[in-house]
Amino acid sequence: MSKFKKTIGTLSRAVLLFIISLFLGIALYSWNAETLVGNAMPMPFGFGISAVLSGSMEPEYSVDDLVIVKKSDDYKIGDVVVYQSENSLIMHRIISIDGNEIITKGDANNIEDSPIKREYVKGKGIARIRKAGAVVMFLKTPAGFLIMLMGAIVLFELPYYKERRKAIDEQEKIKEEIKKIKNQ
């Protein structure tokens, strides 16, 4: 194997392992925040992600879209926001603001939501990745988490396994040479 291919392979594994480790860390952080604190959307560094679970915001946001949410202190009528209602997240458009009270409504809904306090708003939707929410939701399941963990272990172990196998093969060759020398 050429040195260039080996370097590219090592770099690829390192990047994949970093991405998997980052996702596992975020998943554990999120699980901890949701379970222990009741925060359905922790927002480290002022950003969070949310998967669209219903068609209430069609056609702008569809089921399984992944929405990147940015924390804000300035909300206006027309902003699409994510807010926490008990342990659920809802993403709807602001249709009215009265002091500390905000009223939202899904674009595809006929009626407005019950008023919420401004403090329940997590942030504004700033970007969307179509259908990526389905992947994120799967990776949050125990099976998805296990697949990610197994992927990290395989990426971490595979290069060392090949090196160990190579070292064992070399040891066997040396042992054979020693036996030949002894038998002469």
Image (cartoon, rainbow, N blue to C red):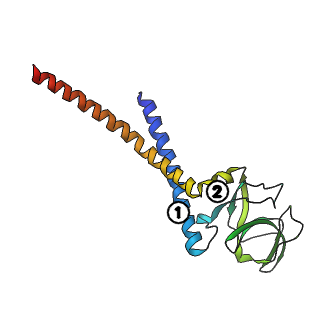
Instruction: Give the number of the disc on residue 28.
Output: 1
Cα–Cα gap, marks 2 and 1: 14 Å
**Helix, strand or loop status at disc 2:** helix
Q: Furthest residue to the bottom?
A: 99
Q: Is residue 45 left or right of residue 63?
A: left
Q: Position of residue 62 (x, y in %)?
A: 78, 54
**Helix, strand or loop status at disc 1:** helix
Examine the image and state in which quarter residue 136 appears: bottom right
In what quadrant of the picture does the C terminus appear?
top left
Mark 2: give few (<14), some (14-19) or many (20+) Cα within 10 Å.
some
Q: Is residue 143 left or right of residue 156?
A: right
Q: Position of residue 141 (x, y in %)?
A: 59, 58
In percent of the image, x 50 and y 53: which residue is there? 21
In what quadrant of the picture does the N terminus appear?
top left
Amino acid carrying label 2: it is: Met
Examine the image and state in which quarter residue 78 appears: bottom right
- Which residue has dot 2 on it? 137
Q: Position of residue 2 (x, y in %)?
A: 42, 27
